Amino acid sequence: MSDQPESAPVIDLAEARHSRLHDIHESRLLKVRAAFEKAFPLPSPSVTEKQSKKGSKKKKPKKR
């Protein structure tokens, strides 16, 4: 029986680079998304429902 030292695990450098780039792009995307939400906040659902209800109550008179 020969005792051969186990070799270190093989690291896929392309996959590691892809992972790092993905993390960098993801963090940039989150920063931009947070800035966009801060600049242009989405209206709450209750506001849009109130606006649509107000508009639907008005009735046009019948044309004769």
Image: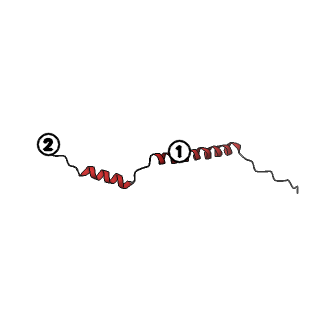
- For the point 15% across and 45% down, the residue is 62
Residue found farthest to the bottom: 1
How far apart are the alpha carbons under marks 1 and 2? 52 Å
The kind of residue tagged 1 is: Val
The residue pinned by badge 1 equals: 32
With 5 as the anchor, is 48 left or right in this view?
A: left
With 17 as the anchor, is 1 left or right in this view?
A: right
- For the point 20% across and 49% down, the residue is 59
Q: Nearer the viewer, residue 22 or 6?
A: 22
Is label 1 in a helix, a strand or a loop? Answer: helix
- For the point 26% across and 50% down, the residue is 56
- Quarter of the image containing the C terminus? top left
The label number, if any, that marks residue 7 in the structure image? none
Q: Position of residue 49 (x, y in %)?
A: 33, 53
**In the rendered view, would you say 40 is above or below 46?**
above
The residue pinned by badge 2 equals: 63
